[in-house]
Amino acid sequence: MRGVGDRRHPRERRGGVLPCNSDNSRLLIGPKTHLLCDCLKATIVLLERVGADHWAAWMKVSLSQIVNGDLSGVKHVLAAYGGMGSFNDLVLCSGNGHRVTNDEYRTVNDELDMLRNEAYDLAQFISRNAVVE
């Protein structure tokens, strides 16, 4: 039952979700989705910087879908995390053809691990709790 005097739409009471686009089945962007978009942007910058082009392109597709209100972008993020050769298996190093020096190896991979874990956790949360209009 709605609180007395609270005449806002139920989605508005959930914490400031904003519509992403104007099509009929749009994903409503809330704070977690904004965080995921920021995380994906940072991940793309890192991957492009070191020449991990395949995964940079993958995350660009996901980001584009999400900002256009398409929930499949969140599922696309999650699809990167399973099986052999997945995003989880990515190690950034010169031996794998990336522009990473031996001195940068640990720092770059620690940053990737942090971004990779954050993106996965946020995508899982959004996938389970998405508000679609």
Image: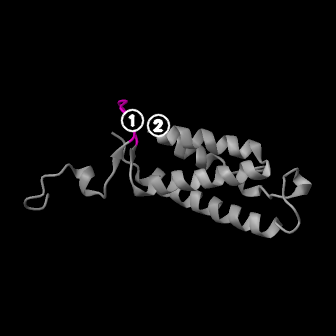
Q: Is residue 113 left or right of residue 28?
A: right
Is residue 123 among the parts visible in the rendering? no
Q: Is residue 75 left or right of residue 70?
A: right
Give the residue type that dot 2 points to: Asn
**Quadrant placement of the N terminus:** bottom left
Image point (72%, 57%), residue name: 88
Q: Which residue is mark 1?
A: 21
Q: Which mark is residue 68?
A: 2
x and y percent of residue 5 in the render?
A: 8, 59
Please report the residue visible at 67 percent of the width from the left and 51 percent of the height from the top: 45
State which quadrant residue 32 falls in. Answer: bottom left
Q: Quadrant of the C terminus?
A: top left
Going by the numbered disc 1, the residue's amino acid type is Asn
Tell which circle, 2 or 1, labels the residue nearer the N-terminal end: 1
Report the residue at 62% width, 41% height from top: 60
- Image coordinates of residue 66 in percent, x first then y, are 50, 42
Quadrant position of residue 101: bottom right
How many C-alpha atoms fall within 10 Å of the one at disc 1: few (<14), some, or many (≥20)?
some
- Where is residue 114 shown, x and y percent of the image? 64, 65
Magenta segment boundaries in residue numbering: 20-27
Q: Is residue 49 left or right of residue 22?
A: right
Residue at image location 12% in from the left, 57% down from the top: 6
Check residue 23 for magenta coloring. yes
Task: Report the residue that reaches farthest toward the top.
Answer: 23
- Tell me whether circle 2 and circle 1 mark residues in contact (CB < 8 Å): yes
Main SS, magenta residues: loop
59 inside magenta stretch? no
Q: CA distance from mark 2 to mark 1?
A: 6 Å
Q: Which colour assignment does the render follow? A: one colour
> Vertical placement of 34 versus 75: above or below?
below
